[in-house]
Amino acid sequence: MVRIAGIDILPNKRTDIALTKIYGIGRSNVENILKTADVKANIRVKDLSEEEINRIQKVVDTIKVEGDLRREVADNIKKLKAITAYRGLRHMRSLPVRGQRTRSNARTKRGKRMTIGAIKKEMATKMGIGTADDKAKGKE
């Protein structure tokens, strides 16, 4: 099992795909990393030599990944909240930060739908809530 930046890399994956499992490394970063380390992208991780793995490790060490990057992102969000910037307020309220609409979408941020509005007469009586007809007649 190959371990780079504290993450176990899957041995049966291609090198360019397997490296994207590290937080902070995407497809464009992988191309640069492999070019700098002089490793072919289509080689499986299990077929890499120790020397190639070491070269990849050295290049990845120069990039901010995993814990350091997560900490930096969290600090940036805390700073936005502290200065009560608009983006910080959106983070506090668990709403989309980057200008997306919330009228019809944003389910991943806002959670499951909750229907608010009319209650059927039968449900109102079961719940013990007086309906508008009851109030008009003076029953409640």
Image (tube, rainbow, N blue to C red):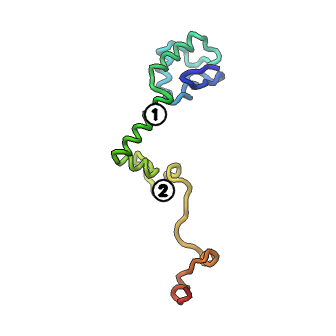
* Residue on which the image places disc 2: 104
- Closer-to-camera residue (87/104): 87
Give coordinates of residue 65: x percent, y percent: 48, 27
Do callouts 1 and 2 mark residues in contact (Cβ within 8 Å)?
Answer: no
Placement of the N terminus among the 4 image quadrants: top right
Is residue 114 shown above or below 38?
below
Is residue 27 shown above or below 44?
below
Q: Residue at the spot x=56%, y=9% of the render?
A: 51
Placement of the C terminus among the 4 image quadrants: bottom right
SS state under label 2: loop
**How many discs appear?**
2
SS state under label 1: helix
- Closer-to-camera residue (32/82): 82
- The label shown at residue 71 is 1
Q: Is residue 113 left or right of residue 62?
A: right
Q: Residue at the spot x=61%, y=74% of the render?
A: 127
